[in-house]
Image (tube, rainbow, N blue to C red):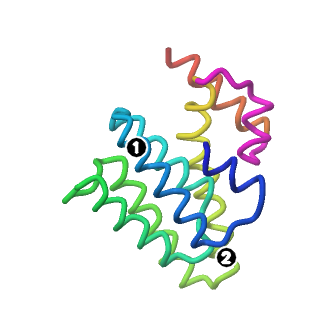
């Protein structure tokens, strides 16, 4: 959330954004925040505040793994997200840059709806605020929130 807030406040270079994201994770680790919460924050900052250069994402993930002393991926969720990302990149190369960007935006929206909307709803934010923060359609956010209520 902090990385997103800082990004919305003023434009940052990928290098500045990289430093902000790593610093945020370091501070969470120092505060002994649960691994589950850190994973949620990592997913949020990776997809809501993306790097413009894909190499920075790769470097960020490597630094992140080193930082948390992980020899393996963070779990099934990370493996799935990584596979979706790889499929999107491969398909984007085949279909051309414009279509790849469009696919990436669709994947980003899917991930935000799946992960970020429920997290923000749990924090007490209403559908309108969540839609505005994540730049998603209000109808889609409401649908996810209703489905989450039904699952309870």
Quadrant (top left, top right, bottom left, bottom right) of the N terminus: top right
Q: Give the label, 2 or 1, closer to the camera.
A: 1
Q: Which mark is residue 132?
A: none
Residue 21: x, y in percent?
A: 52, 56
Q: Quadrant of residue 94?
A: bottom right
| Nearer-the-camera pick, 57 or 97 | 57
**What SS does tag 1 mark?**
helix
* Residue occupying image coordinates x 70% and y 79%: 98
Residue annotated with mark 1: 39
Residue 77: x, y in percent?
A: 36, 47
C-alpha distance separating marks 2 and 1: 29 Å
| Numbered range of the magenta stretch | 123-137
How busy is the neighbourhood of tag 2: few (under 14 within 10 Å), some, or many (20 plus)? some
Residue 137: x, y in percent?
A: 78, 43
| Nearer-the-camera pick, 96 or 131 | 131
Residue annotated with mark 2: 99
């Amino acid at each position: 959330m902090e990385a997103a807030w800082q990004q919305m406040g003023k434009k940052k270079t990928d290098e500045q954004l990289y430093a902000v994201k790593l610093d945020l994770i370091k501070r969470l680790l120092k505060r002994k925040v649960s691994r589950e919460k850190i994973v949620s924050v990592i997913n949020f900052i990776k997809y809501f505040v993306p790097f413009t250069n894909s190499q920075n994402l790769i470097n960020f993930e490597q630094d992140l793994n080193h930082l948390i002393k992980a020899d393996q991926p963070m779990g099934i969720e990370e493996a799935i997200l990584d596979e979706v990302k790889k499929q999107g990149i491969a398909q984007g190369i085949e279909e051309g840059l414009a279509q790849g960007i469009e696919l990436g935006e669709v994947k980003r929206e899917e991930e935000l709806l799946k992960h970020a909307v429920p997290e923000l709803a749990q924090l007490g934010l209403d559908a309108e605020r969540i839609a505005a923060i994540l730049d998603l359609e209000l109808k889609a956010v409401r649908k996810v929130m209703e489905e989450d209520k039904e699952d309870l």
